[in-house]
Image: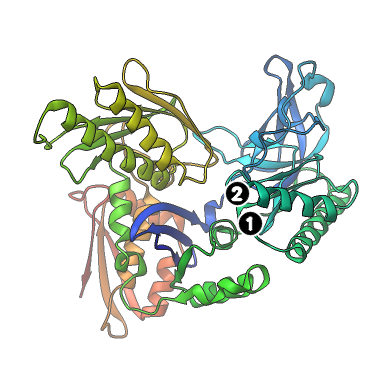
Amino acid sequence: MSREIVINAAKHESRIAVLDEGQVVELWVERTRHRTIVGNIYKGRVTKVLPGMQSAFVDLGLERDAFLYVSDVVEDLEEFDNADSTDDLTLDDVPQQRAEASIADLLREGQEIVVQVSKDTIAGKGARITSHITLPGRFLVYMPTVNHIGVSRRIENEAERARLKEILDRIRPAGAGGFIVRTAGEEREEDEFRADLKYLTDLWEQIRRKAEKASAPTAMHHDLDLVLRTIRDVLSPEFKSVWVDSVDQYQRIVEFLDQIQPNLVSRVRLYRREEPIFEDFSIEGEIAKALKSKVWLKSGGYIVINQTEALVAIDVNTGKYVGKRNLEETVFKTNLEAAKEIVRQIRLRDLGGIIVLDFIDMEDLSNRARLFETLEIEIRKDRSKTKILQISEFGLIEMTRKRVRQSLERSLTQACPYCGGSGRIKSNTTIAFEIWRELMKLRDLHEGQDVIVRLNPVVYSSLNNANDPIFEEIERNLGIHLVFKPDDSLHHEQFDVMRI
């Protein structure tokens, strides 16, 4: 399988796409002003203990207090069998609460505690945190608060799993905590694990010493930004290339890889064409499609994806596809095609929580079994943790997928003022970046030339009030004069760029 990573890196926004055989399967966006805090470590102060909910609120110095469950505080040093999946290791992989544990016995108001963010702020809720720290390296994940050795479930060869555990047993210092071998550690040698182990234990020692001196609330450690995090966690030998359109980011990636995986440096390529990288790789069109609820299938059928507060509902329809032989065959082929596209859309849109799939009902039990098998095979491609239940008597498949951060739709859109919040439109910030990208395409301009941008008054007001420097940079870099004009006739998402 031909796999590539495409990176569009600008000063104010980074966008990364993963392509399988030229098709976009994963997409991440990170803006400088709204960087994810997942993986960051803080020294926080407990502001409220809630015995009735077995949880506490902790001030991290952020806009909202973070939420801490009792299961994320209690240590149980017994080995836990389900901690082998480490590509997205989070609180589900650490020991769970003991039946007799009470949050009131463990924490008190005003107490200072070192915690790590496991989930971003989602839908107005504060961040989810845990006291079970996990520090990811290239080949290992270090868990200083538990005593456990494990291997990623994705490494299936039993002989290799035994070899890796034996290496960890040999190199792990006494009392150092727990380690899990990541998928990237398969077939790696002992010296590579020793280097990773030393880096992680030294990093934890620095964090621990800093926490001893600092007063809460304060940040102890920030995880890598999106670009380097993707290189660390996603890039593997199966990727044929990494394309990046920024010289600075290209140099950062090469230097980073030279330290952690030198054999992959040659696969990093600087994109030099004039056409924007996401347009050249047909990614912009996929982003636009991913913000719509209806997704057409090649056969003529379609799926409809609706995100709600409680769950994500995905419905399958035959649409224009009428088949050739009989209804059962038509429905079965539509469902099989939909299953593959549904998994791609779940990954692309980063959908999480409870997901309900409403396939077209089939009478043949063998067809139901084959559909479920197809879905299971496709979902193995997903790095996030999922759990799928068998098809119900109503033809529904229920599944859960770990939700760590906002979905793509929630990241790029805001509540629609035209429909009272029942739908979604692109946010003012997203439109501003679209205008910025359109302006960056301009060529053959002369010094001091006027360029007029017509846009919706609401977006115009947002740009004026934000004092955003990105358009001042465009004026300096291109030597032009930008004139923004509000136009009531334009939809919220529309704008025009005109040269004078």
Do the residues under discs 2 and 1 have CB atoms within 8 angstroms?
yes
Give the mark count. 2
Horizontal relation, residue 163 to residue 21: left or right = right
Please identify the quarter of the rendering in which residue 312 is found.
top left
Q: Residue placed at 17% from the left, 31% from the top?
A: 329
Residue 164 x %, y %: 72, 52
Q: Nearer the viewer, residue 43 or 231?
A: 231
Q: Earlier in the sequence, mark 2 or mark 1?
A: 2
In the picture, the disc for residue 216 is: none
Please identify the quarter of the rendering in which residue 171 is found.
bottom right
Q: Residue placed at 80% from the left, 38% from the top?
A: 113
Residue type highlighted by circle 2: Ile
Horizontal relation, residue 472 to residue 252: left or right = left
- The N terminus: image quadrant: bottom left
Which residue is label 1 attached to? 186
Whether residue 200 is visible, yes or no, is yes
Question: Tag 1: Cα neighbours inside 10 Å, few (<14), some, or many (≥20)?
Answer: some
Up the image or down, 110 lies above or below 116; here it is above
Residue type highlighted by circle 1: Glu
Up the image or down, 38 lies above or below 184; here it is above
Q: Residue placed at 27% from the left, 80% from the top?
A: 443
Residue 469 x %, y %: 46, 66
Which residue is label 2 attached to? 155
Whether residue 421 is visible, yes or no, is no
Up the image or down, 62 lies above or below 270; here it is above
